[in-house]
Amino acid sequence: MTTADIVAELQGLAEPKYRDFAASLIPGEADLLGVRLPLLRKLARQIVRQENWAAIFQELGTYSLMEVVMLRGMLPGYAPNATLSERLRALAAFIPTIRNWSICDSCCATYTFAREFRAGVMDFLQPYLGSTEEYEARFAVVMLLNHYLNDSAYVAHVAELLSLVNCRAYYADMAVAWCACELILRYPEYETELITRLSPDIQKLTQRKIRESHRCRAN
């Protein structure tokens, strides 16, 4: 399967009405086809089973279509026999191409290998947590949310790291508030300590997210 074949496959999966819907949720994003996320994931899994995923990953880097960027970002997560160093090397190349929350969050959810190699991935995330680039910072925070909050051994460290994120761009702030909200809902004993560490603006965002949550908070 060539990169041209992959793009043709994506074009065949595109839905104009879904494109309009997706574009309405992603401000400023115009270069998209309208391919549903489950179909993107299915195609990514097919590619890593049948092709040299690293070569395809490299070649897809020349395309700007949102679905191609997202598909490319999924390959290091789904590659069945990739080493941690191969995955992280690919992520280092991919992260600078993230340009919206949808690409960021959809790809972060794919990187379940982080749960097996939490210490190594945490080291990899450190520079991005301190980045002033909006989606680099968001990437690191969403990775913490997806792959570290379910391990109680990392909760205190995640609470500390959230207070160190210094990018004040909108989608970075929203990621911090989202992660802080989830942390507090799951581990309410950290609420006072965490809230007091966050900036006033993120405190407000976090508290709003907690209020909007439909889940019951623990006593």
Image (tube, rainbow, N blue to C red):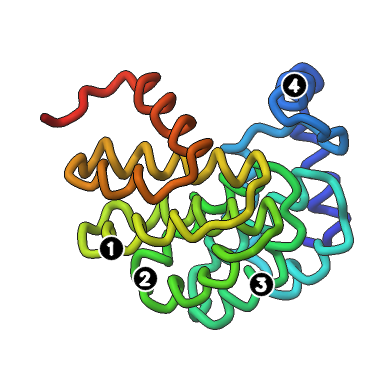
Which circle marks residue 201 in the picture? none
- Residue topped by disc 2: 118
Mark 3 residue type: Ala
Lower sequence index among marks 2 and 4: 4
Q: Earlier in the sequence, mark 1 or mark 3?
A: 3
Tag 2 near tag 3, CB within 8 Å: no
Closer to the chain start, of discs 4 and 1, is 4
Label 2 is placed on what type of residue?
Arg
Query: Residue at 26% of width from left, 36% of height from top?
Result: 185
Q: Please tell me which residue is depicted at 15% across the width and 31% down the height of the picture.
A: 218
Q: Could you tell me residue 184's position as x and y percent? A: 28, 40
Secondary structure beneath label 3: helix
Alpha carbons under labels 2 and 3: distance apart? 17 Å
Residue at mark 4: 24
Q: CA distance from mark 4 to mark 1?
A: 36 Å
Front position among marks 1 and 3: 1
